[in-house]
Image (cartoon, rainbow, N blue to C red):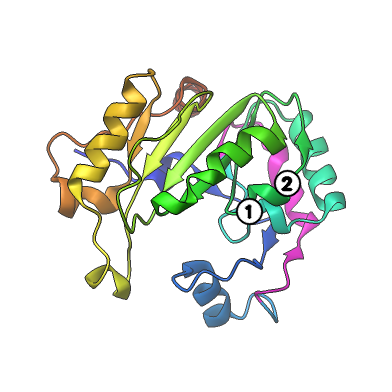
Amino acid sequence: MHICIKDQIQNMNLVIGCTVGCPYCYARNNVRRYHMIEDFSKPAFFPNKLRLMEKERPQNFLLTGMSDLAGWKLEWRDQVFAKMAVNPQHQFLFLSKRPDLLDINTALDNAWFGVTVTRRLELWRIDALRQNVRARHYHVTFEPLFDDPGTVDFRGIDWIVIGTMTGPQSRKVRTDPAWVISLTEQARALNIPVFWKEDLVPIMGKEGMVQELPEAYNKVLEAQRQWQK
């Protein structure tokens, strides 16, 4: 049995839009389809959504499902961080493909900062994350994988997520199972939890799916279950 990561971590799209311009971007396609904003290349902030953080029921939230943290204006980030600070019942995740543009210093214990790596030439992003973001928690998402990342320096990383290409382009891009196994073994050697996204089932098989969450996320999920009783 496998679980869907979206059931464990919900999107809260406080910012919509991204300047990176990945050709396979699902978020840009959705924005165009549903006319969410005029120009996806010009990120827009929706501060009215900050009230969603006031929910007492704990949640794990991804705040960059339709944006890149490097594209956020400083004043947007300050507002979000301030709201996070007074809502410690939640865990908040951020992702970026341009950590070289970040300069963050925070002691927030419920903030998780990560980078997306799709190929070996992008491993520099992990180093840039550690250098430019001084925080308590780091994570790395390998999705989609276009080649073998090889040996990865996972020092200080608290969680890794591995996925593959979805949608029409999945016929052309296929993650090699050996890459998934290698990343998993490297992370586990450092006791780092690993989560294989559900889109890896056709590649890796249903049996033996690795879907580990950080303890902080598990505590949120357990609190949700208690909340429902």
Q: Dot 1: within a 10 Å radius of its alpha carbon, few (fewer than 14), some, or many (20 or more) residues?
A: some
Is 210 left or right of 17, judged from the image as shown? left
In this view, 217 is above or below 47: above
Identify the image quadrant of the N terminus.
Answer: top left
Q: Quadrant of residue 112?
A: top right
Residue type at mark 2 is: Leu
Identify the image quadrant of the C terminus.
Answer: top left
Range covered by the magenta-colored residues: 40-60
Q: Which residue is mark 2?
A: 102
Q: Nearer the viewer, residue 138 or 155?
A: 155
Estimate the x, y position of residue 63 in percent, counting from the top left.
62, 48
Q: Which mark is residue 135?
A: none
Q: Which residue is mark 1?
A: 98
In this view, 221 is above or below 164: above
Is 208 left or right of 11, judged from the image as shown? left
Q: CA distance from mark 1 to mark 2?
A: 7 Å
Q: Secondary structure at mark 2?
A: loop
